[in-house]
Image: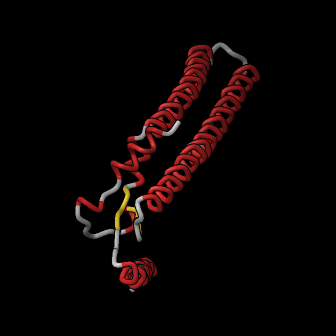
Amino acid sequence: MGASGRGRVAAVLVVLAVLVAAGLVAAQENTLKLGFVDVQKVLNESAKGKEAKAKLEKERDAKQQDIRAKEEDIKKLEADLQKQGAVLSEAARKERQETINRKIRDLRRLFEDFNRDLQKRETELLNEILREIRRLVVAYGKEQKYTLILEAQSGIIYASQGADLTDEVLAAYNQRK
């Protein structure tokens, strides 16, 4: 069994142990209330999640426009060099080629920095929203007296529709300002 298989087995054992413990506690209280939330759905469909994605897309589009303009500039310089290459001196041709090479390097660096910055920005925005969603789920669970609320992405194989709290959490999250 590979490392991922052992990890899944361990996760299932932890969930079972939690369920058994929750069952013992619930047996003492005569109630066991379980639910799950699809946090990814809340993130994707909430107003704040959509707003964050639109903001990131706007930033990405602006940067891509800048990158395309620089690419066009390089293509123009290369085309000019091709046209005038025969009439230019060796030194002038070499100087123009170095200028093109420098612009290509600068463009690559700009592209790499842009991707890194965008990824960092996306992570920051989404993590902030995820923290808010998790705090809301905890508050909702306490208020509604749930014994256990699981995240849908954590490997739930089956759950009844009645256990799905995603829409309630989504509505509550959208009502927050």
Question: Most extreme residue toward the left, as rendered?
Answer: 160
Image location (x, y in percent) of residue 36: 36, 62
Q: Which of these two is toward me, 26 or 102? A: 26
Image location (x, y in percent) of residue 172: 42, 44
Residue 67 seen in the figure: yes
Q: Residue at x 43, y 80 (%)?
A: 18
Q: Residue at x 37, y 55 (%)?
A: 38
Q: Is residue 69 above or below residue 162?
A: above
Q: Residue at x 60, y 42 (%)?
A: 121
Image location (x, y in percent) of residue 97: 68, 27
Q: Which of these two is toward me, 57 or 50? A: 50
Question: Most extreme residue toward the front, as rendered?
Answer: 29
Q: Is residue 145 above or below residue 58?
A: below
Q: Is residue 109 above or below residue 132?
A: above
Q: Is residue 34 above or below residue 58?
A: below
Q: Which of these two is toward me, 78 or 106? A: 106
Quarter of the image with the N terminus is bottom left
Residue 13 seen in the figure: no
Label tally: 0
Left or right for 59, reference 157: right
Image location (x, y in percent) of residue 105: 67, 36
Q: Image quadrant of residue 152? A: bottom left
